[in-house]
Every structure is written in structure tokens, then in C-alpha cells.
Amino acid sequence: MQKLLILSGKGGTGKTTIASSFVKLSEDKVFADCDVDAPNLHLVIDDLSKSITKDYYGMDKSYIHSDICISCGKCFDNCRFDAIVKKEDSYKIDTYSCEGCGVCELVCPVNAAKLQPDIAGRLDLYTEDKVFSTAELKMGSGTSGKLVTKVKERLNMPITRGKLAIIDGSPGIGCPVIASITGVDMVLVVAEPSISGITDMKRIVETSYKFGIKTAICINKYDVNIDKSQEIEYFCKNNEIPMIGKLPFDRNAIKAINIGKTIVDIDCEIGEKVKDVFNQAIKILNT
Amino acid sequence: MNIAVLSGKGGTGKTFISVNLSEVAGNSTYIDCDVEEPNGHLFFKPTNITRNSIYVNIPEVDNNICTGCKKCVGFCKFNALAYTNKVLVFEDVCHSCGGCSIICPANAITEKKKEIGIVEKGISNNVSVISGIMNIGEVSGVPIIKESLKYIDNNNYNIIDCPPGSSCIVMDSIKDADYCILVAEPTIFGSHNLNMVYDLVKLFNKPHGVVLNKYTDKNNPIEEFCNEKNINILEKIYFDKSIGNLNSNGEIVSRVNDKYKELFSSLLEKVTKEVWHAEITNP
């Protein structure tokens, strides 16, 4: 199965808007939402069946058993993440800061600090009719990269059929994005014609190049700033990156999303244009 | 006074609002904690720039001393160490906990510094502009955020432009905040994302209010959400193509447009009053 990943370097550029319409246009209806911090794809995909839900365990987190603790402070002195909090004469774990490294367990002379499993989120897999893998990270959890990997793994389950999977990526360039990129066949970068949009696009293209993956760019809301759009086109030309479409700013896009539809479900200019972007992306994917 | 600007997701206008608030606050410090994609400096175009490298400690193994016991490999929860006839260190996944050097019975592991990014400081009119910038391919920007927040000036306004989302990195950014401004855009994506940061500020018990960005009068899911949950709406910034243009060209709107100068000054005033109020009722 080939995997097409949609990325942007940053949120708000229209990744989910484009990914959801790609899902509609693709015959296979196999897709995933790797934006585990704030997944949105399910909001615009209708008639989803009931999902198979599973708890996601992140890194273990430490716990200090106060009845054993002798308040020697060794855990406090050795924790690099400020996760040990001193309260009067005893020590506690700030679970939000704890990275589960196990140093406190290692240095505790009386075995009062112990790593314990920690539920860090939830995985959902929809398998009837459509195959959709998604997840939500519990607030404040930090292992989103690992969860992204799980979301993608679930696409490979025997129940999955089809040749093409569409993956809505996570924003940024950090570990969840790197987890999103690993093992995909192509990255489509959605760029926004603004000074910040261009900086973000360059950072994500660089990341994708590090992985040696086929990369194409499309511009969303290109007519908001024609000059900046041209700048993106020059960038593509100079770096020999295929530029596969310019989508206009179209209020119908917001309208569609707010009634829980994708932009190809309603009759609008951007919906028509996105079909072309999809076809071109598939062409590149297959060459 | 420390004001953190958050949103459930990127692209809602966090940087737009943070930059303009810092601008109208006059003597202020703008701190860009979105270390993966810092953009505030593109608007401020700061001068007199100084740069500080940010380092973390990563293990260095002396293979002449190493006995090959593999205790370090067994200990590392991040799989940053492996052993094939000698210990290999995968720097990119190391979380710098230091456990391997503690556990090594032969004292073969020491630590060396590795640069993970920089903090840039510059000045733009009266605004001190602090930007944390993480190197591409690093695991965590938290040490860069912590360093950036050291520039908080307790005598002035500090505007903290947070990373998107509600993950651990955002928590670090809002720890010191006296007030949290939640920025939301009027879509169902927006209200879903707002709900996530709303839970976060409630958890930390921070005074908070919402700014509706790209506002349109027509059925606004966010406004309904705020009314339902009784969240204070601080300001509505109407969708305006001219802002889009100024903003996409890297201009600071309140520097060039009086209407927005007034709007952001009034927003700052409202937030300031809210903080005073919170301090009086909840000292």
C-alpha cells in the first residue's frame, strides 16, 4: 500500500481540508489522522462506523511511594526534568514533567520511586466501509511521536485493504512529524503565501528531503498574496520541486467544513481545483 | 505581567495577536516559544541581535574503559544506546536524562554538550524580541523554551507566544503566565481545538479569555461554544482581507493602522484589568 502524507510545517494552512477531500476522491478510503495533538479529520468524514478503541500507554511515569520514601532528596538532585517536587519534607512526582527516564528509580536507595504504566491517550480504528486510523493524546502528554507511529501501524492491519492511504500529518517539524514521515511514499506540502508560511514550508521541505522522499508542493489561498505565491513558485523551480496546484481563497471552504462536509462535497471553485491537485499527486506517486 | 497567547492549533493567529499586543504595550518583551516554527521575528525584524546556543548533555563512552556489560543499554528508556561490539549512541533520540552515566559500573560514560538550538535576542522599537529556534531533527524544544523564558522582565509586559496544541511543551510555556489568551477561529475545527486548550488553562487554574479571530457574524461555532461554557470573549477581530495582506507581508498591523492600534490597546487594557481583578479576589 502506498502512503501519501500531507504536511505543512504549521497548522492552519489547510492540511485537513485538503486531506479530507483527497479521502473523498480516493477510491480506497483508507486514511489516518496523525495530528494526535488536535485531530480534526473525523469532523468532516461522515458516516463513520463504531471504532475499535484501545488505550495508548506512553512512557511509564514515576511514582514515589510516600510510606517508603526517606526524603533523602537523591531523586530531586538527579532529575533533569524538574519532575520531582519538594513538598515540605516529602517528594512527589509532577507527572506532566516526568519523562519516564527512570533515573529516580535508579538512584533511590530504598526503592520508593517506581516507574508505572501510564495511559497517555486513546487509539481509534474504524474498519467498516472505510478504514480510518486516528488517536487522541491526553492533554499534556509528550510522547506524540510514538502515538503517531501506532496510528500508522494500525493502517497495516490485515483488515486494511486498498492501494492508497491518505495521511493527514501533524504540524511542525518535531518528533510527531518525523514519526509521520517515516515510511511514507510521498509528501505533499501545503504552503501558505505569507512570510511565515514560506519559512515554515522551507523547514518542512528540508525535513522531508532528509528522508529522501518524493515531495510536491501546493499553495493554499494563493490569491491572498500573489507576490508571496510567486516567491513559492520560484522556490519550487529553483529546487526542482514539483508545484502541483494553486488553490484560491474560497469562503465556501469554511462553509463546507462548518456543516461537516469536505470541499469536494459541495459545488465550489476550490473543490474543482483540488481534484486536479489530487490527480497530479497520484501521478507523481506512481512515477 | 506575563500574558500567554495560546490556541489549540497553528494558524489561528497566535503570532499575529502576540506581536501586536507587544507592540502596543510599548516597553515589553515578546517571547516566541514556538521553537519549531518561530515566526514573530519576521514581523519585528529586530536589530542588535545576540545569539545564545542552547546545549543539552549527551553521553560519551570511553571504549577503553567500557567492559561491555550493556547495563546502560538496558537502562535507557529512549533506545538511545545500543551495543554491537561497542556502545553506540544515537544522539538524536537521547533525552539527556543522565541515567547511563550513573548506572555504568566502570565509569566509562561521561557527558558532552550538544547544541540543540539557539535563543536570539534583539530589539524592535521598544520591544525586546526573544526567539527560541530549535535545530531541525531534535526531539524536544523544552530546554530552549525554558531558556527563552528566563528573559521575562518582571517590571514589564511579557507576551509569550506559545507553541500550538496542548502538549507538554505548551505547559512549560504557560507555567509563569498571569493570564492566558486563547485564540480561536470560527470553524468546527476551531471549537474542537479550543476545547483542548480550554481544558489546559482550567487544569492550571489560569485566568483566561478568548479572542475570536477571523470573525464573521454568520453562525459562529466558537461563539456558541464560549457562551455555552461561559468563557469570557475578550475581543472579536473581524475577517479583513487588508490585514491578511499586511500580515502576510510581515508588517505589524498596529504600527501602520490606527484602528488596529486601538483594538489591541483596548485588548491589552482588558487583560490587565482582569489580572488585577484576579489578584485582588485570589491573592
Image: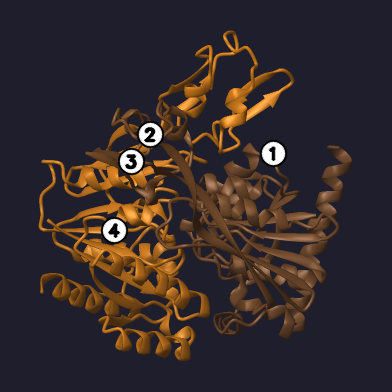
Chain colours: A orange, B brown
- According to the image, label 4 marks what residue? A181
In front of the other: label 3 or label 1? 3
- Residue identified by numbered label 1: B205
Is A206 left or right of A125, judged from the image as shown? right
Q: Nearer the viewer, mark 2 or mark 1?
A: 2
Q: CA distance from mark 3 to mark 4?
A: 34 Å
Q: Amino acid at mark 1?
A: Asn
Residue B77, disc: 2
Label 4: which secondary element: helix
Pick out the residue farthest to the front.
Answer: B64
Q: Which mark is residue B230?
A: none
Q: Is residue B245 visible in this depiction of the protein?
A: yes
- Is the residue A196 above or below the residue A237 in the image? above
Q: Tell me the subunit letter for badge 4.
A: A
The kind of residue tagged 4 is: Ile
Q: Position of residue A52 (x, y in %)?
A: 26, 35
Q: Residue at x 46, y 40 (%)?
A: B110
